[in-house]
Image (spheres, rainbow, N blue to C red):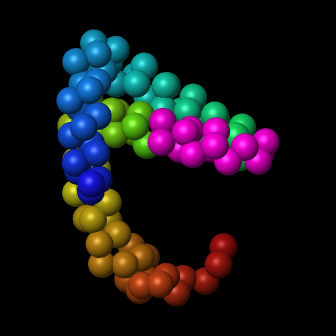
Amino acid sequence: MNLREIQELMAEIYLDRDRKRGADKTLLWMISEAGEVADAYLKSDRKALENEVADLLAWLLSFCNVIGIDLEEAVLAKYGRGCPNCGSKPCRCPPK
């Protein structure tokens, strides 16, 4: 499954309720999931981390569905040719 197919799957499962919830609340849920990813990581709980990163991606895709962004297209537009700053693969920008 590619990213677009996963985004379509999230739309099939959740788009109606995500639209009713709205972009603002969907974004807040996504941010909440990022906190859960951090918590699982800090606790070194691999199974919880796997579940939480999946949830975070699902909420990001749901947010994109609500606001009309094709995430695969957006990622490829920005990173498809390499680093958006230096253009290289791998990135050759000096570390910050």
Of all residues, the one furthest to the right in this rendering is 43
Within the image, what quadrant is residue 78 found in?
A: bottom left
Of all residues, the one furthest to the top in this rendering is 20
Query: In the rendered view, does 37 fall on the left or right side of 12?
Result: right
If the image is split into quadrants, where does the N terminus sit? bottom left
Return the x and y of residue 56 as percentages of the image width and height: 49, 39
If the image is split into quadrants, where does the C terminus sit? bottom right
Residue 45 is covered by the magenta coloring: yes
Query: In the rendered view, does 39 fall on the left or right side of 76?
Result: right
Query: In the rendered view, does 40 fall on the left or right side of 8?
Result: right
Of all residues, the one furthest to the front in this rendering is 47
Return the x and y of residue 74 as percentages of the image width and height: 27, 56
On screen, residue 76 above or below 23: below
Return the x and y of residue 5 as percentages of the image width and height: 22, 48
* Identity of the residue drawn at 30% across and 78% down: 81
Magenta-colored segment: predominant secondary structure: helix
On screen, residue 66 above or below 6: above
Provide the residue span drawn in magenta. Answer: 42-56
Is residue 88 in view from this perspective? yes
On screen, residue 25 above or below 86: above
* Identity of the residue drawn at 79% across and 42% down: 43
* Identity of the residue drawn at 34% across and 33% down: 63
Is residue 74 in view from this perspective? no
Query: In the rendered view, does 40 fall on the left or right side of 79?
Result: right
* Identity of the residue drawn at 27% across and 65% down: 76
